[in-house]
Amino acid sequence: MDPTYRLYGSPGWGSTIVEATLTLMGEPYARVDLKEGVFAHEDERLTRVNPLAQVPALVLPSGELLTESAAILLWLTEQHAEAGLAPLPGDPARAQFLRWMAYIPGQIYPMYWVRDIPSRLAEGEAAEQVILARTAERIADCWRMMDQQVSPGRYILGDRLSVLDLYVTVVSRWTPRRRRFYAVAPKMAEVVRRVDAEPRLAGLWAERFPFDDGWEG
Ligand SMILES: N[C@@H](CCC(=O)N[C@@H](CS)C(=O)NCC(=O)O)C(=O)O
């Protein structure tokens, strides 16, 4: 039995949220990065463990496979409750935590399944361009609606950093990218900037999702 977590992922992809979580928890993990230049479904190391061919996919020390980013994050916060990265059952912040933890993979993340390969749903260049434009607008709208309904302190749920902050920080870097996010979600903009600057994550961001020139879009 492998005593550590094994995380299938790719720099900057959804696996980065899990890496940030494990980093803050101080939990060691091994990475299996997708091959560069091929689609996820073409990497047989991934399809062997996750037939859906998506990352993050986390193999637990027991050998069990966990997929779906929200499930992974929730499970990790239960297993490593001492890290304090989630309001646990009984905490007054729990309901809103679960709400927004489900909102991101329910409303926003699936847009990228379409965007990454628009021909999955559209036929022809013109139709693909419409899909790309409309999904970008939908994502921005979802961020706007979330921002209107949260009351952040230093972090989205108050003054405690949670995996929700890590989730929003990474996903908001994807199209339509951060400049648009700052405009539509001004309250959460302050939070994600704080998480970008979190000293315990500096090494991870530099290695796995660097703030290169023009990164904000
Ligand atoms: N519902 C999944 C979505 C995961 C997902 O779409 N991951 C992307 C990378 S960020 C992926 O693996 N895409 C490859 C594909 O769908 O072909 C989750 O929340 O983890």
Image (cartoon, rainbow, N blue to C red):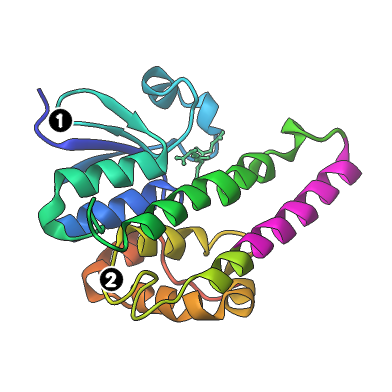
Residue under the point 14% across and 49% down? 80
Distance of label 1 from label 2 (alpha carbons): 27 Å
* Total numbered labels placed on residues in the image: 2
The quadrant of the rendering that contains the N terminus is: top left
Which of 145 and 34 lies nearest the eye of the viewer?
145
Residue under the point 36% across and 69% down? 157
Point out residue 54 in the picture as x, y percentages from the top left corner.
47, 33
User: Where does label 1 land, which residue?
Assistant: 61
Magenta span contains residue 126? yes
Amino acid type of the residue that numbered disc 2 sits on in the rendered structure: Ala
Nearer the camera: disc 1 or disc 2: 1
Point out residue 190 in the picture as x, y percentages from the top left corner.
45, 81
Magenta span of residues: 124-142
Tell me the element at label 1: loop
Point out residue 165 in the picture as x, y percentages from the top left corner.
37, 65
The quadrant in which residue 200 appears is bottom left
